[in-house]
Image: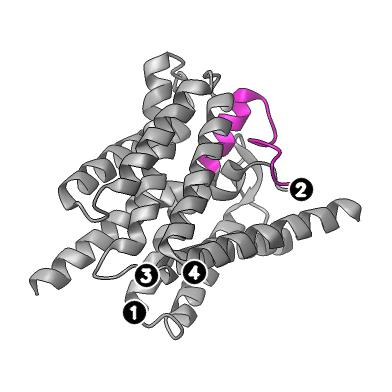
Amino acid sequence: MHENVTRTISGLLYILLLVSATLYSEYSFMLLFGLFMLITVSEFSKLIHLKRNLPVLLALVSYILFFYSPKNNLNTDILLCLAALFVSINLIADLFSENSIPKTDKMSKYVNLFGYIIIPFVLLMKIPFIGVHFNPKIIIGVFILIWTNDTFAYIIGKLIGKNKLFERISPKKTIEGFIGGLVFTMIGSYVLSYFFTFFTPAIWVCTGLIVGFFGTLGDLVESRFKRKAGVKDSGTIMPGHGGILDRLDSVIFAIPFLYLFYQILNYVHTIS
């Protein structure tokens, strides 16, 4: 009982901090997610057995470059997005390949650090700046959909889940839970479009589909890293929840795919 209370309070404080900082101003949003990035880099470095000083320094430099550079530099942003997508697709391929040999050389670790953690955080912080003005409600909407997917995947999986989704990586996930989470996320996307009207219902539903599908893959990818490391959680900063990477694994994996989708929409809108 005490553990559930701790978990609930910790989760509510996390949501309150994330929502309030994101909505308050662009600077509080960037500072919060910059802090999240540094903590996540530290946690991930520990998972893959990298000394944390250099990765955290590289993350800090990346953040400073983002903070003081133009927020919408399309050519650079697309190159960053493609680099992250390359790493993401490679991680998905490794996930589904039973015979894949884990790469433990330092170069591969730094490639994963940048493509799986640092670049997605930079792209996440760029998403509200796609368009003319800073729009934090895009990020709030994305997180609402991620939380919807996680919540209903858990509920449906508990109620009717019988067929394992990926037992060797995450024994508790079921196919029924995955489908249920995705269905309710798309329903939630449609409902969200009535409150956040800057996107059409079709765009919100596509957003829900992207974050639901790739967010689940992101959760599995992080579970694979944790299994290799022999740990249950990426960290201990959030009592009852683990680390920041445990809370953000779904969204940071989905972000490169979502960012590319939004940039395509922005390009089509600009030339139409």
Under circle 1, the secondary element is loop
Could you tell me which residue is drawn at 37 percent across and 83 percent down? Answer: 197
- Give the CA separation, mark 4 to mark 3: 9 Å
Residue 242 lies in magenta, yes or no?
no
Based on the picture, tell me whether residue 229 belongs to the magenta stretch. Answer: yes
| Residue occupied by mark 3 | 135
Which of pointers 3 and 1 lies earlier in the amino acid sequence?
3
Disc number placed over residue 240 in the picture, else none = 2
Instruction: Reply above or below: 191 against 230.
Output: below
Mark 3 vs mark 1: in front: 3
Label 1 sits on residue:
198
* Residue 159, horizontal then vertical, whole percent: 73, 64
Q: What residue type is labelled 1?
A: Phe
* Residue matched to label 4: 23
In the rendering, at what x and y percent does residue 65 appear? 31, 40
Q: Give the range drawn in magenta.
A: 220-239
User: Residue placed farthest to the top in the image?
Assistant: 105
